[in-house]
Amino acid sequence: MNTDKLTNPIVKAAIDALQKGDKKTWLSLFTTDARLYDDGSPRDFKKFSSEALGHERFTSIDKIENNGLDVYGHFHSDQWGDFKTYFKFHINVDQKVSRLDIGQANY
């Protein structure tokens, strides 16, 4: 899947790492205390990263909003199947992701 349409370099690097299952690169883009919200509910970011990388990925990127920070697309999870999702990245002044909101999307 082509990620060239991602305009924010941090978001692009994170999605590229997710696509490749590259946990080391993925984690290096986030703060040590990064927060994760799944459909609005808090979730353990490190546990998610450990379980998702290598088993979950975008199959298409359908739209990008919020200056490249919000990504919508079709997604595959080995555990949950195929569905539309969003990933909304919050980047701090140090250019690290401090919060990630994910969930099922309707568009």
Image (tube, rainbow, N blue to C red):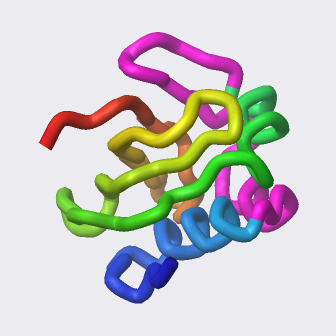
| 38 in magenta | yes
Judged from this view, the residue extending furthest toward the left is 107
Q: Quadrant of the C terminus?
A: top left
Nearer the observer, 102 or 98: 102
- 41 vs 85, left or right, is right
Height in image: 13 above or below 102? below
The x and y percentages for residue 66 are: 19, 58
Compared to residue 38, the image places residue 82 above or below, namely below
Q: What is the x, y in percent for residue 9?
A: 47, 79
The residue segment tinted magenta is 21-44
- Residue shown at 53%/14% (left/top)? 42
- Residue 75 lies left or right of residue 25; in this view the side is left
Q: State which quadrant residue 34 falls in.
A: top right
Quadrant of residue 103 in the image?
top left
Q: Is residue 52 left or right of residue 14?
A: right
Q: How many marks?
A: 0
Q: Is residue 18 above or below residue 43?
A: below
Q: Residue furthest top?
A: 41
Q: Quadrant of residue 8?
A: bottom left
The residue sitting at 55% across, 29% down in the picture is 36
Determine whether 94 is above or below 32 in the image: below
